[in-house]
Amino acid sequence: MSDQNQPFFSIQRAYLKDLSLEQPNSPAIFLEQDMPTVEVQVDVAAERLAEEIFEVVVIATVTAKIKDKVAFLVEGKQAGIFEIRNVPVEQLDPLIGIACPTIVYPYLRANVADAISRAGFQPIHLAEINFQALYEQRLAALTEQQGANGSAGGAGLVMPDGSAAQTH
């Protein structure tokens, strides 16, 4: 087998795609003595940029409230461009949905903690995420949704154009 047919996986670039910070109740919120409650949401999106090039984006939204007032809201989108060649179609979706976000997520964690710190709050370090479990939950929900809609087959990570990285 020649090297040209060998599976290939490489990150071409990791970059901060978007970062927003809102402090709707500043400066008054800094005078509050209570500890904030924090809610974190994480999602993953993917897009095929070219035949063998994919962009994978990990999105985190962190909302901190003191009583019923928002102290801050941070949304970050950390992306990576990945080159993936000669990978069997049944392995492509898990690679995009598990391996790629696992590579990109540490950058997002650092950027979110830095933004929160620069806003004048104690930094919040996002917990480690098991992207395999997140991927499996998404796949189960998609399969359940397709079953409810009466569609046959299943797909994993759905691209913005409606196609899937993998189809069964």
Image (spheres, grey):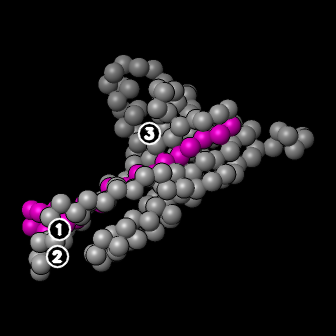
Question: Magenta segment range?
Answer: 52-71
> Image point 39% across, 65% down: which residue?
112
Left or right: 78 as drawn, with respect to 103: left
Callouts 2 and 1 close, C-beta under 8 Å: yes
Q: Earlier in the sequence, mark 3 or mark 1?
A: 1
Q: Secondary structure at mark 3?
A: helix
What kind of residue is marked 2? Answer: Phe
The relative height of residue 63 versus residue 46 in the rendered view (above or below) is below
**Which is more foreground, mark 3 or mark 1?**
1
Q: Nearer the viewer, mark 3 or mark 2?
A: 2
What residue is shown with label 3?
139
Quadrant of residue 116 in the image? bottom left
Q: Is residue 139 magenta?
A: no
Q: Which class describes the residues within 10 Å of circle 1: few (<14), some (14-19), or many (20+)?
A: few
Badge 2 crowding class, 10 Å Cα cut-off, few under 14, some 14 to 19, many 20 or more, is few
Where is the C terminus found, in terms of image quarters? top right
- The residue beneath circle 1 is 26
**Mark 3 Cα within 10 Å, few/some/many (few <14, many 20+)?**
some
Which is more toward the observer, 74 or 2? 74
Secondary structure at badge 1 equals loop
